[in-house]
Image (cartoon, rainbow, N blue to C red):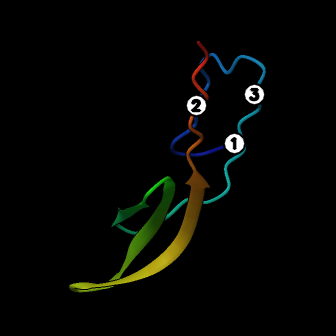
Amino acid sequence: MTGWGDYDGENSSYTLENLYHSKEYGYCLVEIDGLDVTLRWMERVGAGKYKGREVWSCTAAVPSRQR
């Protein structure tokens, strides 16, 4: 990765890859529905106007209980 936001710390066995870099202000909208989680990057497109740009989602795993 190059440019602002580079991370050169300990990554263990993972290799970081910069997938998206917003040049505008915005916020992350988080929606939770049971175990399903959706994060949506809302990017500023004008004064008081925002548009959904990137979406990430996952489902949380519930570990089984062992007795």
**Left or right: 8, with 26 as reference point:** right
Q: Which of pointers 3 and 1 indicates the residue nearer the eye?
A: 3
On residue 7, which mark appears? 2
Q: Quadrant of residue 21?
A: bottom right
* Alpha carbon separation for disc pair 1 and 2: 8 Å
Q: Which residue is mark 3?
A: 14
Q: Residue at x 46, y 67 (%)?
A: 40
- Residue at the spot x=36%, y=65% of the render? 29
Q: Going from the N terminus, do you reach mark 3 or mark 1 first?
A: 1
Which residue is identified by label 1? Answer: 1
Q: CA distance from mark 3 to mark 2?
A: 12 Å
**Is there CB contact under 8 Å for labels 1 and 2?**
yes
- Camera sees residue 25: yes
The quarter of the image holding the N terminus is: top right
Q: Quadrant of the C terminus?
A: top right
Viewer-proximal residue among 65 and 59: 65
Q: Position of residue 30 (x, y in %)?
A: 38, 61
Of marks 1 and 2, which one's residue comes earlier in the chain?
Answer: 1
Residue 14 % position (x, y): 75, 27
The amino acid type found where label 3 is placed reads: Tyr
Q: Are marks 3 and 1 in contact (CB under 8 Å)?
A: no
- Indicate whether 61 appears above or below 37: above
Q: Which residue, as the protein is rendered here, is positioned at the far top? A: 67
